[in-house]
Amino acid sequence: VCNIRSCHNKCAMAMNSKPFTVFVEGNIGSGKTTFLEHFRRFEDITLLTEPVEEWRNLKGWNLLDLMYKDTAKWAMTFQSYVSLTMLEMHQRPTPTPVKLMERSLYSARYCFVEHMMRSGTIHPAEFAVLDEWFKFIMNHIHIDADLIVYLKTTPSVVYERIKKRARSEEQCVPLSYIEELHKLHEDWLINRQHAECPAPVLVIDADLDLSQITEEYKKSEHQILRKAV
Ligand code: DGT
């Protein structure tokens, strides 16, 4: 069902053609949700925020919490559910010409799973299974990707934000984890160390605090909205 006011033709066009699809990527606490919220004022955009709430409540189970409390035991289960929820977001029909998604299957694989593998948190056999799933999806399911917005931050800055927002599951997150995730985002999006970078990357300085960040976000409006039908 289309909820776009005043856009009957545009909407019909959007339903028949694929939307301009943007992934918003960046470290934990880099402001991805705030970035998405900035675009809520534009009526031709579908915003898909990350399914953290689903990860916190799957039939009453808080998988995010289990994963942080006993990573070795729960990482595989958690990552498997992340993949499912992300794939569902990639596949979700979009009634607008632009689709803005928080994260993607790519960051799950190239940042989080990569970290679990390198740090030895998951067994090489578990990594092999997750990697085969990822490759199978990439080879058999078309994932739309037109632009990646990379909210680039300094680890110490986001670490302070994470402490301040005090999400209960993240209380034990050390600065070293944030630094390693930062490096993995840089390796993927800036240094291009993986074959797969599915779209051009727009880098935004996301260290700025809330009072200044709107100006920075505005710089990306043109690139995201000009693609609208
Ligand atoms: P924001 O708006 O930039 O502050 O975004 P966050 O921090 O709410 O969202 P995100 O995706 O960086 O992280 C949410 C939580 O979920 C955080 O504790 C990290 C965790 N997380 C997200 N994706 C994955 C994943 O694929 N694997 C693992 N292990 N954790 C993940």
Image (cartoon, rainbow, N blue to C red):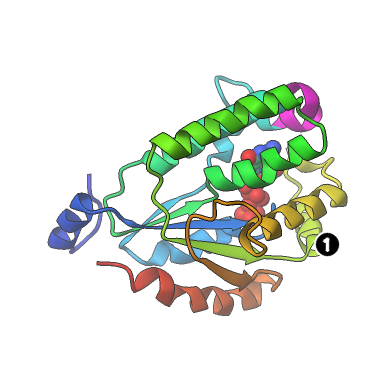
User: With 13 as the anchor, is 89 left or right in this view?
Assistant: right
Q: Which residue corresponds to the image point at 36% horizontal and 66% vertical from the top-left?
A: 42
Q: Quadrant of the C terminus?
A: bottom left
The span picked out in magenta is 65-74
Q: Quadrant of the N terminus?
A: top left
User: With 129 as the anchor, is 42 left or right in this view?
Assistant: left
Residue 225 lies, in percent from the top left, at 36, 71
Question: Residue 146 occupies which quadrant of the picture?
Answer: bottom left
Residue receiving disc 1: 156
Residue 155 in the magenta stretch? The answer is no
Residue 208 lies, in percent from the top left, at 69, 73
Is disc 1's CB within 8 Å of ligand 1? no
Is 105 rendered above or below residue 127? below
> Around disc 1, counting alpha carbons within 10 Å, would you say few (fewer than 14), some (14 to 19), or many (20 or more)?
some
Is 200 rendered above or below residue 132? below
- Name the residue nearer the viewer: 18 or 209: 18
Q: Which residue corresponds to the image point at 29% horizontal and 59% vertical from the top-left?
A: 97
- Name the residue nearer the viewer: 212 or 120: 120
Q: Which residue corresponds to the image point at 59% horizontal and 21% vertical from the top-left?
A: 60
Task: Please tell me whether the stretch drawn in magenta is mainly helix, strand or loop.
Answer: helix
Residue 227 visible in the current orientation: yes
Where disc 1 sits, the SS reads helix
Question: Residue 17 occupies which quadrant of the picture?
Answer: bottom left
Question: Residue 88 occupies which quadrant of the picture?
Answer: top left
Residue furthest out toward the left? 9
User: With 209 as the anchor, is 120 left or right in this view?
Assistant: right
Q: How many marks?
A: 1
Is 131 rendered above or below residue 31? above
Residue 66 in the magenta stretch? The answer is yes
Q: Which residue corresponds to the image point at 56% horizontal and 46% vertical from the top-left?
A: 106
Q: Quadrant of ligand 1?
A: top right
